[in-house]
Amino acid sequence: MSLHKNINSANGLTPAGRFLFFVAALCCIGCSDRKGLIDQKLYEGPISSLDSVKTLLSDSANVILRLTAPKQNNFEEGDREWPLGFLLQSNNSNGEAESSFEANYVFYDKKEDLYHATGNVKVRNFENGDELNTEELFWDPTKEEFFTEKFVTIKSDDEIHTGEGLNATQDFSTYTILKPSGTFLLENSN
């Protein structure tokens, strides 16, 4: 027993002292690991990703919106992204296609309740045949309207209207080009 006591006193630590030294060492290691975690950049990517998305929204058992997309990313704050584009079809109360909205890329900002579409954006009204083409468009589902400040082309019957900026109803039944630049007549091929 005296030999054991001499070894402990030779190291300068009693068993209780060694235990406290071990605990202090673990705390220091733990603190440096936490500092490393704090210094890491927070993950801001999607919390879920879905392939081959088909979403239906109905009212009184009638499908009023049909969304199809090859991919959808969902984010923590409720934002959504369709990195490969989407096609959104709006139906009337009889379930017949009324209008469509498609683009190569769409991002939905939940806080603003606003869709931002870019790349080959098209909006069609199936009743009157009008079709909008642009490279950027915003859709506000609360106000039920589309708008942009970018260049737009609208094909309507045998005319093409062009200009910068647009305000339009959600079903694309009425619209206003903010800075019209021209109207072109299409030749009838009959």
Image (cartoon, rainbow, N blue to C red):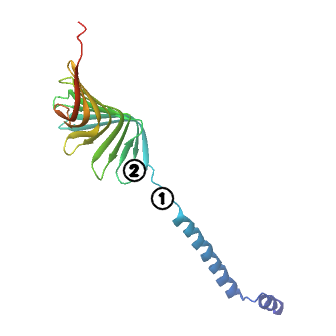
Residue 173 position by quadrant = top left
| Disc 1 residue crowd, few under 14, some 14–19, many 20+, Cα 10 Å | few
Inspect the image, locate mark 2, and give the three-letter code of the amino acid beneath it: Phe
Secondary structure beneath label 1: loop
Disc number for residue 75: 2
Q: Indicate the position of residue 53 as horizontal and vertical percent values.
A: 38, 36
Q: Indicate the position of residue 6 as horizontal and vertical percent values.
A: 81, 91
Instruction: Name above or below for residue 153 compared with residue 32.
Output: above
Q: Residue furthest top?
A: 190
Residue 18 position by quadrant = bottom right
| Residue 76 visible in the snapshot | yes
Sequence order check: which comes first, mark 2 or mark 1?
Answer: 1
Q: Which residue is mark 1?
A: 42
Q: Indicate the position of residue 116 as horizontal and vertical percent values.
A: 32, 42
| Disc 2 residue crowd, few under 14, some 14–19, many 20+, Cα 10 Å | some
Inspect the image, locate mark 1, and give the three-letter code of the amino acid beneath it: Leu
At x 59%, y 71%, the residue is 32
